[in-house]
Image (tube, helix red, strand yellow):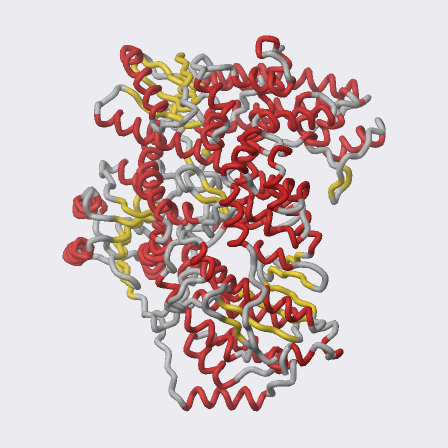
Amino acid sequence: MSFADLADHASLNGKTLYLVDGSSYIYRAFYAIRNLSNSAGMPTNAIYGFTQMLKKLIEDENPDLIAVTFDAFDADEHTFRKELYDDYKANRSAMPDELRIQIPYFRKVVEALNIPIMEQAGVEADDLIATATVRAREVGLNVCIISADKDLMQLLGDGVSMLDTMRGRRYSPADVLERFNVTPDRVKFVLALAGDTSDNIPGVPGIGEKTGGKLIAEFGDLETLLANIDKVSGKKRKENLTEFADQARLSLELVTLRDDCPIAFDIEHLHLSPPDFQALAHLFHELEFESVLHDLNRWFKSRGWLDDRDIEDLKDSLLDEEITRTDEARKDYRAIFTLEELDEVLAACKDAGRFAFDLETTSVDPLEARIVGMSFAYKPNHGVYIPVAHSYEGAPAQLSLDEVLARVAPLLEDPDLPKIGQHYKYEWLVLRRHNIGFQGVAFDTMLMSYVLDPGKNSHGLDTIAFDFLNHRNIKFSDVAGRGKKQLTFDQVPLDKATPYAAEDADITLMACDALLALLDEEPELRKLHDTLEIPLSRVLGVMELNGVKVDCDILNQLSAEFEVELEKLQDEINVHAGSEVNPNSPTQLREVLFERLELPVKKRTKTGPSTDQSVLEQLSELHPLPRLILEYRSFSKLKGTYVDALPELIREDTGRIHTDFNQAVAATGRLSSSNPNLQNIPIRTDRGREIRKAFVADEGHLLLAADYSQIELRIMAHLSGDPVLLKAYKEGQDIHALTASQIFDIDIDEVSGDQRRAGKTINFGVMYGMGPRRLARDLDISMPEAKSYIDNYFERYQGVATYFEKLVADAVETGYALTMFGRKRLLPTLENKGAGRAFAERAAINTPIQGTAADIIKLAMIAIQDRIEAENWPARMLLQVHDELIFEIAEDALDELRPKICNMMETIVTLDAPLIVDSGVGKNWFDAK
């Protein structure tokens, strides 16, 4: 029965045809699940993800009718879009081999499930969906498009919706209007203006989705807009629309979906029907998807398509065909107790041309840790452990640490023999204390994982093993116990220690291969790992060894002063509260603030009205007590976290504090520090800044603080190409005064101090998505005033407005934000609504700027440390705090080295808005600012 024959078929009314964008499913599955293969070694990750997505769809939606569309992957002829525009999709990389080998199986899965397939040479899956949608609506069917492709949003309307099953989000015409500011039938005009970087559709430069939506909402369609360019605001926008009008028309042809493809199939065939159980069972057995088959069989039973006898017959059929499976390779882990065995292992590592290396020690602190043993892996599923200091009762005789280090040192110090580590900075620091220079580290699995997805919660080996190898590591607690009874590793019996330690090296080796395959698909990320993160680890190791000198006398003096301040604040708090009250007790504060003083409740928690910082800030406008409580808490935190705590962290052997620099934590690529966190010392208050007085230089040395001036604003100017900002930076204007003059519409010479402060707040705030509410609070102005300031900012800096708009549009399209150096930050919540999407939009704008700044200072750190070592400068790099580097330099070399360091920082990259470094010198960090 054809579509035409069913025009009057009342039985179809109200039923829904589910049209699955199979090509989208394939790619999303491939990139969502990595490094899964069957025992024959064939990649199955995309097939597995694709199958799971289809399974979830039919289980959750229980569709009446369904079809899957595919692009014609194997067709030799181009699509009609390629004929129109030869550069269409020209910037797309070739399909990865790991995916190409899986392509035939997607059709097999769909066919075994007895779901009809739509595929046609010369057109794309989107065109087939458009055609089927039109034909289905003609016969009274509703349509649900299974995709997240924005191009398909032009099809939404009465009876047509879209479902993104991966995010569980349904799209309606109202969602389209919210995103594009136009109805679905006009989306194609917006897409024509905005273009599409992923498909290489040119669009009109300087116009993104947001601006395009506003223009089409105003003018109706592309031709009407092009006929009324003189009515468009913005000189540059008019010029671009005039110059690139034909390009916009071409783009419109490229984004418009064909809804007249010559598809012909029987509508009865679209009904969801029982699968080919034999074909499905054999296929899933080959792919080793037994758990998926089990789940599907359970659903098939619920539909009445299968019973227990049928399932048993299928199992017998599979056994009769003697389909076998290769078990996972047996792990070969062993301990080494003789020099002869050790020499054989080291020779094998050398012959293999690379190896993974890992230390087992007594502490996670590399400056305290004693080496207990070391492990090597040079081929998959094999690992050796060389114990040197297990000292439990009954422990066997082991090689001595000195003789083992003497044997392994030449390999570890060979810069031309590639090594693999997991957080290799730790091994570098421990070995450095034994006078061994750990060189030739080509790969660090922690850093590989980090550059691939910096937003992950963990880049530890256990997480990496599970995510990329589908393997669960032996946990430290499994061999050493937990809590107070936990053993140090030297007390762990070797029958437990050996498999644990050898596995660390083995899994590091195999994880490296899995991660390297992903990095090689993205050359920019591979370059970040090889040329930035790997060398930076060693630089950070040097800085951690250097440490920073701290004057306890100054801290003790500050502690006494802070105690006096706290007592005064406590007295004032008691007076305003009418009784003694503990500023750190939420219970007491609730009683005073909301019952006795009857201040309004701003926020609630499970235990009652909130008294957190944001609430107290709001209440400070109504009563002096909340401000005093905030001040008390601030002083108390400074005293407890820094003034009183820092002396306890000074090492007796060096007289210095050695902070840890964390390289794989911040999603933007920024460094952080811990034990202690020296990057969070407050510098906005006088008391916070005074803590820096305790960080001092050695005798005969001075501290140099070199700070990038407004680096993020300069990067924003460079990346956006905003002509006003670029001109200002090239001419050395006061950028905050300039912004104030722009938003207040006054001459720059007339800008007052308060107005400049407003300009500065807006300049930095816009990069972090500051809205009118926050700006109003920061500047103590009304919401309408704050909104007008922000509107004026983007009106005057149109290049910035267009750039921000493009960043969000690109992130929505690709799912990630990019820095200037190709660092990626995945932003999956961009498809959400509410706070999740708002955060992701802010991250889409801020990450390219903040992440680029982070990468620039990393490049500078590497270059400067190389120079320090190559030329034997009497200088040590001590700290990195946001945009600032702190050095300890011999007094007699300061005049020579200060300009060299500043020049290297300023010239490490070339921006259209030149980098400037401000520097200061002093005996302590406070005076160096």
Residue at 16% x, 44% y is 410
Q: Position of residue 705 (x, y in %)?
A: 40, 18
Which quadrant does the C terminus fall into?
top left
Which quadrant does the N terminus fall into?
bottom right
Residue at 37% x, 82% y is 324
Q: Position of residue 893 (x, y in %)?
A: 27, 13
Q: Is residue 104 above or below residue 23?
A: below
Q: Is residue 694 above or below residue 116?
A: above
- Whether residue 504 appears in this view of the structure is no
Residue lying furthest top in this view?
Answer: 749
Does residue 536 appear left or right of residue 778 in this picture?
Answer: left
Q: Is residue 856 above or below residue 364?
A: above
Residue at 63% x, 47% y is 221
Residue at 55% x, 68% y is 261
Residue lying furthest front in this view?
Answer: 227
Q: Position of residue 563 (x, y in %)?
A: 61, 18
- Kindly indicate the quadrant of the structure image that contains residue 535: top left
Q: Position of residue 674 (x, y in %)?
A: 46, 34
- Whether residue 841 appears in this view of the structure is yes
Does residue 103 appear left or right of residue 787 in this picture?
Answer: left
- The image shows a total of numbered marks equal to 0
- Kindly indicate the quadrant of the structure image that contains residue 424: top left
Which residue occupies the foreground of this view, 378 or 450?
450
Which residue occupies the foreground of this view, 566 or 897?
897
Which residue occupies the foreground of this view, 673 or 157?
157
Which residue occupies the foreground of this view, 106 or 547?
106
